[in-house]
């Protein structure tokens, strides 16, 4: 009987547990670096855990450096887009043999047996010697000979500020396999997605170099004229490093946050040094604020590394160009470090969900500026995203907008990707705060972080958290804002002609002109400057915005199929001066000219 009960209990547990799974990797990489020829030999062990329910017969690795060759998909795409990235343009097509990037796979084995493989551009296709069953692991061993390309995009040698090596996307990285199968996207322009795991990376490089990297420096051993730098990182999905002989390396301990901040930069001039010194305390302040507002950063180290070609996020580090004005240096640093939350810990599939990392990061960046650095950035505190809203309104007039759900490499213009992911993605959150209430939004964001960090959430995992937090059904919001380019436009009208002919009442009518339905807030301002806020929920929300402070007068639900909605206002006590839809500006109503009635 006891036995029976025990098994019954197990049975229940397994059925109740959420069926989420993710693959896992353990990399051990040894790099022998030749700084004279910008080439290296790699020896790479990869233990790969198949946590899926599928049997795997084939695996894929990304060979990102192969993108930097004339005729590559990245090259062709850049030369055929109407608005190519200025850093790329036709530069790849002009690289000579010594300037291109490549990975030549010398050997690949699975559990000691050599494997059939085929390189197609930036993707290495590998047939397994024996199938990898569910809940089993296998050991890969790779040897490769690689050349670091001249810096074109993100990664490479000799960036424009003279940083020797910016080593992002620099090793054969196994593609992600999830509930939607393989994601062996060729490297064309952007966005990364890879399995979680541990990295143990040893880099042997000429002794004059200072090496910065993801993870913790475990040891540095001298051998002849080289140092071997060993870094270990746990629970990350990428690994970046950079090297330069001229790096200054400053460390700031932030005891209150269990954090060490590392800064690597060149002493190019006095301004550069003073900016990078000033950056250190502000970065600590940013971490303090973001930890409180968005959830606690779990690693004990973060490095701001001069390098790359702008700003790019990596686990526990960023590569940013350093010769900037102070506001720009701080702003890019804050943007990239917030990616530690929205991408490095909440590891969404960026190819499809760039709006969830770039958009959420841009949102959090503006909130952080507004609350911590307002003397530098001076955002309008009523709507700290006002500039993003304006950028969106301007852009959609071009007619180039595409749905946010577009794969990030498949947008027809860079601009549509950029405004979509960064701007419309940031507005997604600000406007969600309008729908569910600001307090619920931030509580939900922290809950999303705590429940989904170290995993691969998608838009519905996020949505479910927000639904639980707010008690509001939100699928319609993603359906419209993410999957279509439908716009929001409401107008307001009034009439004194009521059926009951009551002279003291007016009938207000709100008209939906845009295709996207939204809950509506209406502010009524009286002659004595007092005001009242009316609120019309959508019936499809099955609930209302948080009104615990009783600031809203809640009206009947609006069934979205109706194009207009009427309600009455009583003017017997005081005269109305103005009636306005969307007074906070947090709803992205594209035409404000029809939002106000003024009485005079
Ligand atoms: Zn970003």
Image (tube, rainbow, N blue to C red):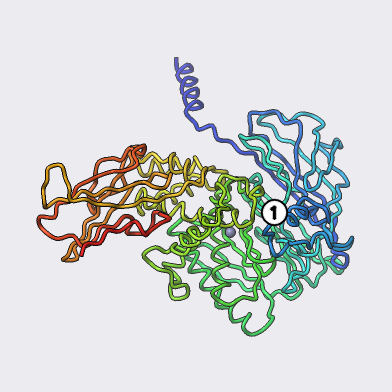
- Say which element carries label 1: loop
- The image quarter containing residue 529 is bottom left
The residue at the far front in this view is 497
Residue 214 vertical placement versus 508 (above, below): below
Q: Is residue 300 left or right of residue 598?
A: right
Where is mark 1, residue-wise? 189
Viewer-nearest residue: 156 or 591:
591
**Which image quarter has ligand 1?**
bottom right
Q: Is residue 330 left or right of residue 78?
A: left
Residue 307 vertical placement versus 409 (above, below): below
Quarter of the image containing the C terminus? bottom left
- The image quarter containing residue 384 is bottom left
Quarter of the image containing the N terminus? top left
Q: Position of residue 64 (x, y in %)?
A: 76, 52
Camera sees residue 259: yes
Q: Residue at x 64, y 85 (%)?
A: 270
Viewer-nearest residue: 411 or 141:
411
Q: Position of residue 517 (x, y in %)?
A: 39, 44
Q: Position of residue 321 (x, y in %)?
A: 66, 70
Residue 293 vertical placement versus 105 (above, below): below
Viewer-nearest residue: 121 or 102:
121
The residue at the far top in this view is 1
Q: Residue at x 36, y 44 (%)?
A: 470
Q: Residue at x 22, y 46 (%)?
A: 567
């Amino acid at each position: 009987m006891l036995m029976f009960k025990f098994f019954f209990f197990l049975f229940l547990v397994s059925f109740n547990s959420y069926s989420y799974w993710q693959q896992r990797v353990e990399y051990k990489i040894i790099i022998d670096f030749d700084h004279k020829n910008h080439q290296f030999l790699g020896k790479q062990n990869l233990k790969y855990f198949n946590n899926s329910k599928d049997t795997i017969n084939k695996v894929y690795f990304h060979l990102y450096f192969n993108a930097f060759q004339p005729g590559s998909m990245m090259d062709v795409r850049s030369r055929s887009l109407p608005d190519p990235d200025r850093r790329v343009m036709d530069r790849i097509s002009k690289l000579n043999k010594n300037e291109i990037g490549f990975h030549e796979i010398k050997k690949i084995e699975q559990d000691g047996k050599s494997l059939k493989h085929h390189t197609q551009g930036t993707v290495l296709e590998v047939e397994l010697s024996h199938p990898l069953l569910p809940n089993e692991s296998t050991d890969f061993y790779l040897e490769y000979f690689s050349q670091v390309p001249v810096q074109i995009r993100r990664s490479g040698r000799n960036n424009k500020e003279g940083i020797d090596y910016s080593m992002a996307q620099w090793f054969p990285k196994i593609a992600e396999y999830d509930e939607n199968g393989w994601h062996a996207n060729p490297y064309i322009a952007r966005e990364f997605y890879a399995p979680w795991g541990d990295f143990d990376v040893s880099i042997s490089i000429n002794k004059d170099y200072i090496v910065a990297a993801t993870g913790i420096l475990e040891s540095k051993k001298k051998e002849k004229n080289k140092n071997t730098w060993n870094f270990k990182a746990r629970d990350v999905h990428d690994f970046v490093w950079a090297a330069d002989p001229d790096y200054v390396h400053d460390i700031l301990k932030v005891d209150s946050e269990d954090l060490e901040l590392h800064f690597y930069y060149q002493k190019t001039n006095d301004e550069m040094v003073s900016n990078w010194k000033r950056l250190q305390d502000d970065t600590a302040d940013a971490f303090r604020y973001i930890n409180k507002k968005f959830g606690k950063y779990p690693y004990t180290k973060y490095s701001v590394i001069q390098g790359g070609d702008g700003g790019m996020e990596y686990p526990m580090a960023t590569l940013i160009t350093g010769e900037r004005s102070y506001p720009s240096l701080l702003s890019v640093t804050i943007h990239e470090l917030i990616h530690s939350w929205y991408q490095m810990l909440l590891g969404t599939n960026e190819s499809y969900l760039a709006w969830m990392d770039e958009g959420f990061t841009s949102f959090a960046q503006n909130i952080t500026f507004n609350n911590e650095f307002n003397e530098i950035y001076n955002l309008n505190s009523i709507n700290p995203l006002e500039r993003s809203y304006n950028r969106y309104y301007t852009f959609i007039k071009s007619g180039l907008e595409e749905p946010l759900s577009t794969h990030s490499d498949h947008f027809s213009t860079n601009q549509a990707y950029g405004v979509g992911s960064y701007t419309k993605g940031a507005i997604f959150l600000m406007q969600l705060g309008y729908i569910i209430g600001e307090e619920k939004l931030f509580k939900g964001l922290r809950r999303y972080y705590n429940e989904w960090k170290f995993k691969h959430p998608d838009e519905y995992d996020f949505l479910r958290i927000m639904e639980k937090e707010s008690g509001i059904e939100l699928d319609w919001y993603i359906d419209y804002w993410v999957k279509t380019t439908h716009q929001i436009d409401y107008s307001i009208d009034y009439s004194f002609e009521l059926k009951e002919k009551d002279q003291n009442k007016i009938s207000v009518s709100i008209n939906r002109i845009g295709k996207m339905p939204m809950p509506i807030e209406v502010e009524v301002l009286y002659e004595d400057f007092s005001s009242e806020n009316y609120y019309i929920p959508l019936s499809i929300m099955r609930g209302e915005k948080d009104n615990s402070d009783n600031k809203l007068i809640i009206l009947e639900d609006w069934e979205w199929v109706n194009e207009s909605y009427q309600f009455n206002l009583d003017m017997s006590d005081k005269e109305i001066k103005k009636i306005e839809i969307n007074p906070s500006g947090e709803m992205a109503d594209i035409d404000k000219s029809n939002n106000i009635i003024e009485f005079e």
